[in-house]
Image (cartoon, rainbow, N blue to C red):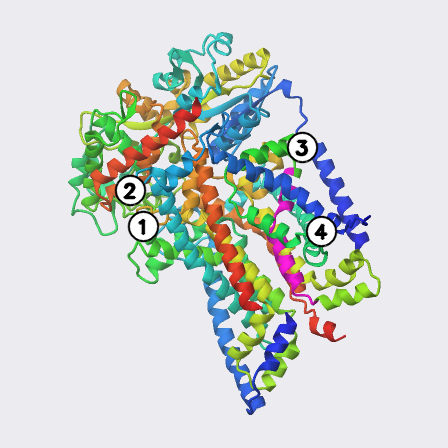
Amino acid sequence: MSNQAVNGLDNRPVVNRPGKVKGSSNISISKYVSYTFLIILCVIWIIPVIFGISTSFRSQTEVVSSGFRLFPETWVFENYVTILNNTSTAPILRWLGNSLFIATSHTILVVIVISITGFGYTRINFKGRDTLFFTLLGISFFPGVVNLIPSYKIIDSFGWVNTSWAMIIPGLAGMGNIFLVRQFMNGIPKELDESAKVDGASDFRIFAQIILPLVKPILIVCGLFSFTGSWNDFLWPVIVYTDVDKMPVTAGLLLLQDIYGNYRMIGQLMGSAILAIIPTLLLFIFAQKYFVQSINLNSGIKG
Amino acid sequence: MKKKFGVVLATVMMLTTVLAGCGGKDDSSKTITFWTPLTGDDGAYMDQIVKDYNATNPEIKVKHVITADMYTKISTVLASSKGVPDLAIIHADRVPGFVKQGVLESMQDTVLPAQPELKAENYLPQAWNTGNIDGTQYTVPLDIHSNVMYYNKDLLKKYNAESFLDDNVVTIDEMLSLQGKLDEGDYVVNDALLGWVILAQIQNLGGDIQADGKPAVNSPVFKQAFEDVKKIADAGLMTPFGEDGYLMFQSQNVLFSTDGTWSSTAHAGVEGLNFGVTNIYSPTADKFTNRSSSHLFAMLKNDKRTDEKEVGIANFLEYVRTNSMEWAKAGQNVASNVVNQSPEYQSYMQSFFTSNEKEIESLYIYTYEYYPYIAEAVDTYCADIVRGNVDLDETLATMQKFVEDKIAESSSAAK
Amino acid sequence: MKKKINWAPAFFVGPHVILFAVFILLPTIYGIYASFTKWNLMSDPVWVGFDNYKAILFDGKSTFHTQFFRGLKNTLIFVGLSVPLLIVIPLMVAVALEHKKVKMKSLIQSILYIPGLISISAAALIWLLIFNKQLGITGNLFGSQIAWPANQPYAWIIIIVITLWGGIGGNMIIYRASLSGVAQELYESAELDGAGSIKRFTSITLPSIRFPLIYTFVMTTAGAFNVFGQPLMMTDGGPRQSTHVLMMYIRQLAFGNGESIAGMASAMAVLLGLVILVISALQYYVMNRNAT
C-alpha cells in the first residue's frame, strides 16, 4: 500500500509553489479545524455518558421530576448499595469476575487464531485459497436467527452447557477479525517475506519474526474488539447458562429488568451498566498506547 | 513469541478445564430444577419463597433458576431434549399452545393426588381454570397479574374528580368531562399497556376476540373498542404519542395510569406520589374488566422426572399455596385463597381486586388458543389507531389477516 | 509422480476451518434447511419446499410479504443513513487525531470509544431521557415540543444518533491503527511540495489505508443490515411501523408471543443474507478495483 502512495506522489505533475510557507499556515488552520471538530464531537459524546453516570446517583423521584439537570440535586448512593448488596439473585461482582475470565480467555485465543489464519490466507499459497476465504466470509454474512437451536445442540453434545467453554470457543469461528487481519497483512509488502524466504526461513519463522510484529497494532485492535464483543454479548449467554452464579455480567443485567422487559428502577440500571463498563474501559485506556504504535513499513522496504 | 503463546494457551486451557469441571455436577435426582421468567424484584421474592421452603428440609430441595429469555430457552432444551427443567412458571396464554404441541405434562394424575389441597376450590377460579384443557389439569396457579388503573389522589382532588371513583368504575364519559379543565402539561390518562386496555374494552362491550374458534379481530366490537378509547386521545386527554406515560404518572402529570399490578412497588418508591388503584376505565358504568394473565406452575415433558420428584413438586406447590404471602410483595394478586383472604393480605394495595366477587370476576384471562397472535396484532397497531394515524377499517382488516396468516403457519406446523 | 504434501495450509488455515465448520457452517446449513419447513422450534420441522419463499416474495396479500418488504425497505433506509456516517466521522476523527499538534489524543479517543461499551438497554434509556420532552435536553433546553420517537423524521434521527454515538469507536480505532503505519516522511515530502491538506488526504491518507477502508465498509454495511436493538429500544418500530426493520420482524416471528413461526423467519433471514451477500460483494469488487 505504501508503494501505491509513493507512486501517487511521484506521478503528480511537479508544480512550483512556495511550499514551506504555505504548508505551515495550512498546518495551523488545519489544527484549529481539527480541534473544533474534535471538541464539538467530544462534548456531544460525553454529555449522555455524564448524564448516565449522574442518573445512577439519583433517586427514582428525582429521575422523574421535571426539567433537565446534568447533575443530581441530591447525590444518593442507594442504587449502588442495592446493587452490591444483592448477592443472591444478582451477584454483580461475581458476574464481573466471570465476564473477565471469559473475555480474557476468549480474546487470547482469538488473537492466536486470527493471526495464524490471517497469515494462512495471505502468505501461504494453495489452490482455491481466496475462493475458500470469500466463501467462508459470505456464509458468515447469513444472519443467524434460528441457528440458536442447532448451536445449542452442538455445544450440548460437547457437554458445554452452563460452562464457560460455550462462551469462549464458538466465537473463535468468526470471520470478521480474520478479514481485518487479512486486509492488513495484504498491505504489508510481499518483498519483505520473499527476501526472507530466499534466505531459507520457514513459513513459521516468517510468520513469527516478520509479519507478527508488523500487525501487532491491528491484533491489539482485534483483541479489543473480541474482548468488548464477548463482554457485551447477551443473546447467547442467556441460552447457555442456567446458573446465576456463572453468568457473565451483560446477561446478568437482563435479570434486573422487570418481567415485561422494562427497567423501572432507572438509577439501579444505570449503576449496574456503569459498573459493567469499567473493566473494558480500563483495558481500552491501557491498550490504546499500543495500537497507534508507529511501525515504519517504508523503511522496511528500503532496508 | 511461540513460547509465550504456548504458555498462555496452556494456562487458559487449564483454567477453563478447572472452571468447567467444578460446574453443574450437583446430584440432579435430589433437586427439583425450577425455571422462572421472574426477573427483577419478582425473582427475589420467589427466591425467598424457595429458600424458605428449602429451610423446611424437604426430601427433595428446589433449585430456582431465573432466566431472562425463558421461552427461547425452553425451545432449545426441548429441541435437544436435555436439560429440561422439572418445574417451570409459564404464562396463562402459553398453556393452550403448549398443550396442543404436546410439551406439557398433565398434573392431574401425577402431582395433584399427592396433595389433596391442590384443588380448584382453593384458588381464584379463573387462575385455576386457565390450566384446564378439555378436562385435564395441566397447571397450578401462583397468581393473577392484571392491567389495572392507578390514580393520583392529589391530582384527582385538584381537578375535583374524586367522584369518578364512587362506583369503582371510571367511565370514558367521566374522563371526557375533564376536557379543557386541565393545566397545560397535565393529562387524564396515559397509554401504558394500551393493548391490554383495548382487550379489556372488548369484554366491557360484551364481545369476544373469537367466533367459533376463528379469530374475530375485524369485527364491530373491536371497532367500537378502538373508537371509544380513541375519543380520549382525540380530546387531547391522553399523554402524547411517543412520550413515556409511565414516567409522566410518576412525575405527577397524569391522573390515571393504566399499567400493571406489579408496578405498585415502583410507584411506591417515588416520594410524594400519593396514589391508589382502581379498575381500568370502561365505556359503561355497568361493566368493568381488568385484562389479566397468570403465572402458572407447569411441568414440561421430561422422561427423566421420577415419581418421587413429582411428589416433591406437589409438596413444594402445597407449601407455596399456604406460604406465598411473600409473593404479595411483588404486587400481584396471589391465587391461593388461604393467602388472599388472610387479614395480612388486606394491607396490600392489590387486595382491592379480591375484595368481592365482582372484582374477582373482573380479572379476565383470555384462553383462546390464538390469543397471543391477536395480542401481538393489537400491540403492533393499537397506538397508531388510537392516535388516528391510520384508517381504522383498513387496519382492522390488516390485523385480521395478520392473525389468520400466523395461524395458518403455526397450526399446520404442529401436526 | 510423487508430490511432497504441503502441510502449511493445514497448519495455518485448517484449525479455523474446523471451528468454522462446527460453529458457523453447521448451524447456517440447518437455518437454510429450516427455511424450507414449517417449524415451531419445538417439534420436528415439516418440509414445505418453496412455500415460505413463495409467500414472502410473490403473495402480495400475505402478511409475511408485506412485513418482509416493509422491513427490508426500512433496513435499507437505516443502512443508507448510518453507514456513510459510520465511515466518514471516524475517518475524520482519526485524521484529526493524526495531526501532530493535537494534544490529549488518548483522552479524546477514550471519550469517543466509551459509548460503545455501554449496554444497549442502558444507552437507549439514557437517550430516551435526553429526548424526553419533560425530562430531557431537547424539551427543556431547545424548547422542542415534539415527541421524537413517534414522529418522522425524528424517529429516524434518534435511531441514527444512538447508532453513531455507540458505533464510531470501532472504526475509529481501526483507522487510527492503520494511519499510524503511514510513514511520516510521505506527509513531510508532500508538504514540501506544497500539497494542501485535502490533497494530502486524497493522495496519501486514503490510498494507504485502502485495505482497512474496504474492510470497514463491507463489515459496517453487513452489521447495519442486522440492526434491531436500536429501533426496538428507541421507537419500537413506530410510528406506523416506519422504523420497523427486517430483523425485528424476523425475531418476532421466531421468538415472539405464541407459537413460533421459525420456518418463515428463517426464509426471511436467508433472503436478508442474500441481500447482504450481493451488496458486500459489490462493495468489495468496486472498491478493490478502484483502489488498484
Q: Chain of mark 4?
A: A
Q: Which residue is mark 4?
A: A112
Mark 3: which amino acid? Answer: Phe
Q: Relative to B259, is A233 above or below?
A: below
Q: Mark 2 and mark 1, same subunit?
A: no
Q: Earlier in the sequence, mark 4 or mark 3?
A: 4
Q: Which residue is mark 2?
A: B383
On the rendered structure, is C37 left or right of A121?
left
Magenta range: A166-189
Of the numbered discs in the image, which one, if any, rests on residue C256? none
Mark 2: which amino acid? Answer: Ala
Q: Main secondary structure of the magenta part?
A: helix
The crowding category of the residue bearing disc 3, from other C-alpha atoms within 10 Å (few below 14, some 14 to 19, many at least 20), is few
Q: Which residue is mark 1?
A: C150
Q: Residue at x 52, y 33 (%)?
A: B67
Q: Nearer the viewer, mark 4 or mark 2?
A: 4
Q: Chain of mark 3?
A: A
Percent x, y for residue B341?
Answer: 37, 18
Q: Is disc 2 placed on a helix, strand or loop?
A: helix
- Is C214 magenta? The answer is no
Cβ–Cβ below 8 Å for labels 1 and 3?
no
Distance in Å between CA atoms under marks 2 and 1: 10 Å
On the rendered structure, is B46 left or right of A201?
left
- Is A169 magenta? The answer is yes
The crowding category of the residue bearing disc 4, from other C-alpha atoms within 10 Å (few below 14, some 14 to 19, many at least 20), is some
Q: Which residue is mark 3?
A: A158
Closer to the camera in the image, A172 or B283:
A172
Q: Chain of mark 1?
A: C
Percent x, y for residue A188?
Answer: 68, 66
